[in-house]
Amino acid sequence: MPLPRLPLVVLALVAASAAAASEAIEKRVEPLLGYWFSPAKDAAAARVLRITNVIFADRDAVELAAQYGPASAVAWDEARELTARVQAGRIVLDLVTPDGVRRRLAAAPDGALEVAADPKLRFARSSLAEIHRFAAHNPEPAARAGKDSVIELVYIGANDCSLCRRWEATYLGQGKLAGSPDWRHLRFSEIKLPTLTAPFRREDLPERLRLRFDALMADGLRIHGVPSFVLLVNDQYRAQALGPAAYESFVHIALRAAVQEKLKTP
């Protein structure tokens, strides 16, 4: 005896409706992908939320992948959880930070993400360049330069790297860095890998930097290619970059800021 067709049609309609609802909420949440930034007078309190991608969506909620942490951190850790829902017509995000703190963020009329339980945390749409500018000028207290501070730029390159040669020609040969007033306040450490495809190893560093880099790598520092740059102030992390463009937009700004801090200290 043939099965009734009506229940199958109903099931198909229900499935289609659920799929449409899932797609609708996902499309509404997708514009949240990118960088969100909550600045603060106390640099240690400034926070970054980077929403990277959608993991899963159903008709009620969207699971998202995200990173979260202080603006000046060596690296932002993965959030334990980030779920988006629509409540009372606006998007609400339930965040579990890397250290297990739960926060609820709601979309404000101006597009910001507000944290109801902590009015000081208010995330506005931002960019990596804007966050880097803030971090360059607002370091953690231990990484702020004083009169006797050692400001060190660690440069990691390779002789067969065309971008490395271009950076060296501009900043060392033509003097954009080596010929600037900042140079005499700087310790410059150059490390050359055998080839640009060689992985960076701890043994490539001079002995005095190995323990420092061990700690930085435990905090999330990664050297994924050349030219790479790491700026230290009193052996404390201040900035890092991969490539000439990121050097210019972050490390060079942080380096100049550190020199100005040193010169302004009584």
Image (spheres, helix red, strand yellow):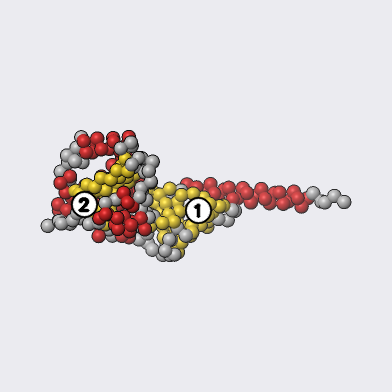
Answer with left or right where residue 86 lies relative to residue 256.
right
**In this orientation, which residue lies closer to the viewer: 220 or 101?**
220
Residue in view at x 78 percent, y 50 percent: 6
Task: Please name which of the two marks, 1 or 2, marks the residue nearer to the observer.
Answer: 2
- Pick whichever of labels 1 and 2 is earlier in the sequence: 1
Identify the amino acid type marked 1. Answer: Leu
At a point 56% along the width and 52% down the height, the residue shown is: 57
Along the line of sight, the residue nearer the viewer: 197 or 177: 197
Q: On screen, 121 above or below 192?
A: below
Res 147 label = none
Can you give x and y, in whole percent of width and height, for residue 146 in the image? 17, 57
Residue 47 locus on image (x, y percent): 36, 57
Q: Which mark is residue 64?
A: 1
Instruction: Answer above or below: position of 41 versus 190.
Output: below
Q: Secondary structure at mark 1?
A: strand
Mark 1: give few (<14), some (14-19) or many (20+) Cα within 10 Å: many
Residue 75 percent across, percent down from the top left: 37, 54
Camera-side residue: 99 or 58?
99
Q: Is residue 251 visible?
A: no
Q: CA distance from mark 1 to mark 2?
A: 39 Å
Please indicate whether residue 265 sits to the left or right of residue 86 in the image: left
Label 2 sits on residue = 151
User: Where is residue 84 drawn, in percent x and y?
Assistant: 51, 55
Amino acid at circle 2: Ile
Q: Nearer the viewer, residue 78 or 6?
A: 78
* Residue at the (60%, 50%) spot, across then down: 21
Horizontally, residue 93 falls left or right of residue 178, namely right
The answer to whether residue 52 is visible is yes
The C terminus lies in quadrant: bottom left
Q: Residues within 10 Å of mark 2 (few under 14, many from 20)?
A: many
